[in-house]
Image: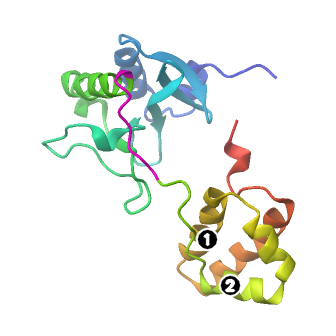
């Protein structure tokens, strides 16, 4: 199967294709190297992710992998998942007219400079998962499941715990629990299929 090109990926977002192409043209003028990761265009320096480009249902834009370090006195950057995402920030647009090349390039250059000097948000990858009651109950009924869960990396444990906790309704939590039990038993992470 042939690898997708950036042009093919951008064409999957016809509503935003023109705006994404404009952002891409700005990015390729910089020191960044264009790659494809997670089926999205990602721009790197020395193999380190700096910026990503994407189209979504209600907006398109750029995300900065270490965006929390960017100087943003006007509050233009958004945290996509408040309370969850520590480092990443997005610059969102709902039309091509909203793109200010100078602003975009200012943030991009800051991100490049930060990466070149090794600045990064420190994330405690070993912090323990907060196990939701439904998962605790499953562990009390199945000691082997608990043991399998404990053998996962702390990051994978947190993914599973948050997946259950984020559901609002009990029925959804139950469905999610049923979905993750076989994955835990296999010793894989919830999002492993998205990893390269």
Residue at 41% over, 46% down:
122
Q: Nearer the viewer, residue 159 or 171?
A: 159
Above or below, comparing residue 140 to residue 50 in the picture:
below
Residue 92 visible in this rendered orientation of the protein: no
Mark number for residue 161? 1
Q: CA distance from mark 1 to mark 2?
A: 10 Å
Give residue 30's position: percent from left, percent from top.
36, 12
Front residue of 5 and 120? 120
- Residue 32 lies in what quarter of the image? top left
Horizontal side of 25 relative to 133 (left or right) equals left
Image quadrant where one finds the N terminus:
top right
Q: Earlier in the sequence, mark 1 or mark 2?
A: 2
Residue drawn at x 78%, y 56% is 188
Image position, residue 47 (x, y; %): 54, 22
Give the structural element (helix, strand or loop) at label 1: helix
Q: Is residue 130 magenta?
A: no
Residue 114 appears in the rendering: yes
The percent position of residue 26, horizontal first and vertical second, equals 34, 17
Camera-side residue: 145 or 88? 145
Q: Quadrant of residue 135?
A: bottom right
Q: Is residue 147 left or right of residue 31?
A: right
At horizontal 81% and vertical 68% (from top left) the residue drawn is 148
Question: Which residue position holds label 2?
Answer: 136
Q: Main secondary structure of the magenta part?
A: loop
Q: Is residue 117 magenta?
A: yes
Q: Residues within 10 Å of mark 1 (few under 14, many from 20)?
A: many
* Residue segment shown in magenta: 116-123
């Amino acid at each position: 199967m042939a690898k997708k090109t950036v042009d093919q990926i951008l064409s999957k977002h016809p509503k935003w294709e023109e705006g994404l192409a404009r952002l891409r043209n700005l990015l390729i003028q910089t020191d960044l190297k264009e790659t494809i990761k997670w089926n999205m265009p990602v721009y790197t320096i020395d193999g380190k992710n700096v910026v990503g480009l994407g189209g979504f249902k209600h907006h398109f834009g750029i995300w900065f992998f270490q965006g929390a370090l960017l100087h943003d006195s006007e509050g233009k950057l958004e945290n996509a998942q408040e309370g969850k995402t520590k480092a990443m920030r997005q610059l969102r647009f709902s039309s091509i007219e909203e793109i200010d090349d100078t602003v975009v390039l200012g943030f991009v250059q800051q991100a490049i400079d930060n990466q070149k000097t090794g600045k990064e948000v420190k994330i405690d990858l070993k912090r323990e998962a907060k196990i939701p009651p439904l998962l605790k109950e499953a562990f009390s009924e199945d000691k082997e499941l608990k043991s399998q869960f404990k053998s996962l990396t702390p990051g994978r444990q947190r993914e599973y715990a948050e997946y259950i906790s984020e559901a609002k309704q009990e029925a959804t939590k139950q469905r999610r629990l049923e979905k993750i039990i076989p994955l835990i038993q296999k010793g894989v992470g919830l999002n492993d299929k998205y990893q390269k």
